[in-house]
Image: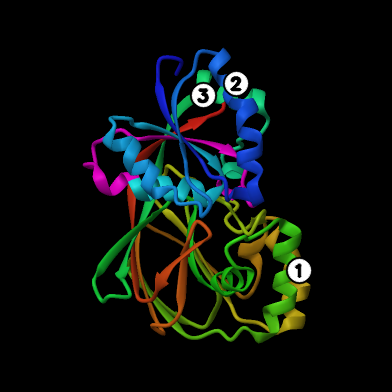
Amino acid sequence: MRDTEYCVIVNPAAAAGKARRKWPALEKKLSAAGVRMRVFDAGDYGDCTTPAREGFAAGLRHFVAVGGDGTANGIINGVLPLCPDDTNITLGVVPWGTGNDWANFQRLSGDTDDCVALLTRGVLRRQDIGRVTYTDTAGGPATHYFLNMSGTGFDTYLLDAMGPTRGSRLRYLWTLLRVYRSFRATRVTAHLEGETLDLSPLLFEVCLGSFIGAGMLLAPDAECDNGLFDVLAIEEMSTWKMLRSLKYLYNGDIAKHPATHARRCAHLAIEGDHTRLFQCDGELVGTLPINIDLLPGRLRILSPPG
C-alpha cells in the first residue's frame, strides 16, 4: 500500500481529544515512511461525513479514520451513497476512539508503529456492510450504513443517557447500572427470512462484528464476510436477573442464556413504536420501523500485515 494516496480524516471529538493530540506524532512517522496522504479535520463536532465526501470528490478512494467506531461510520456514510456498488472503497482505522469495538473485532492496534505498518504493509480484505432504510423526521426515505452493529433497545436508551461523549467500558457499566431500572422495553416485531419474532427485547442487535459497548462480546461467532448477519435478541428481564447475567455479555456464552434468541439472515425488517430509537455503530440515527439489508463484500478494509 506504499503507492496509495490516503484520505486521512482526524476526528478531534474522538475520545475527548485523544485523536487530535496523538495525530502529529503519527503523521510524522507516516511521512517518514513515505506514506502519501491528504489530511482532513472533522471539526470540533466530529462531522466525518463531510470531509469524506470532499475526499471522494477529489478522487481519493482509500480512507483512514483516525478515531473510533463513529469516525469510521461517518466515513462510510459519506462515501458509499456517492458511488456505484462496484466502486472499490478502502477503509483503514487508527483506533483512537473510546469503545473501538469494530477495531477490536478486526484486531487493530492503536500503537503508532502498528498504525504505520497498517498503512504501508496492510492486507486488503473484503467486508460486508449493513444498510438500514427508514423514514426520517421530515417523513422522507433515508438510508444509513453500518460496519459493526445496528440495534434497538437498551443500547439506544443507554447511548441517549450517556450523551455524545460516550465513554469507556467502565463508564458504560456505570451508566448501565444507573439507568437500567428506568428502562421499559416495548414490543417489536422482526420479520426475518422465513420467521417472525414478536417480543419485548432488552436488546435487539444485528451484527457484522462481535463487540458492542466498549467490549461486550455480543456475537462471538460473527464473521464480517460470510454474507449473513448474526441477529441477537435478548428478552427483557428484572434488574436482579440482569445483574446475575452480566457475565454472559463478556464470556462468549450469550447465546446460551435462556432469554436469548440467536439467528442468522441477510435481510430483516423491524417494526415497533415509532418513537423507539435505533443505532448504527454506536451512533443514534432514527426511529423504527426499519429495513436492514446486507451488502456482501461492499467495502475493502485494511487488516494488519501478517
Give the magenta-colored segment's residue range.
Answer: 79-102
* Dot 1 or dot 2, earlier in sequence: 2
Q: Position of residue 115 (x, y in %)?
A: 60, 27
Residue toward you, 43 or 296: 43
> Contact (CB < 8 A) between labels 2 and 3?
no
In the picture shown, does residue 183 fall above or below 171? below
Residue lying farthest front? 44
Please give the residue where the numbered disc 1 appears in the rendered image: 174
Residue under numbered circle 2: 28
Is residue 81 found inside the magenta-colored segment of the image? yes
- What residue is disc 3 on? 119
Query: At 57% across and 75% down in the image, what residue appears?
Result: 157
Give x and y (percent) for residue 260.
58, 71
Q: Which tag, 2 or 3, sits closer to the chain's start?
A: 2
User: Which SS class for mark 1?
Assistant: helix
Question: How far apart are the alpha carbons under marks 1 and 3?
Answer: 36 Å
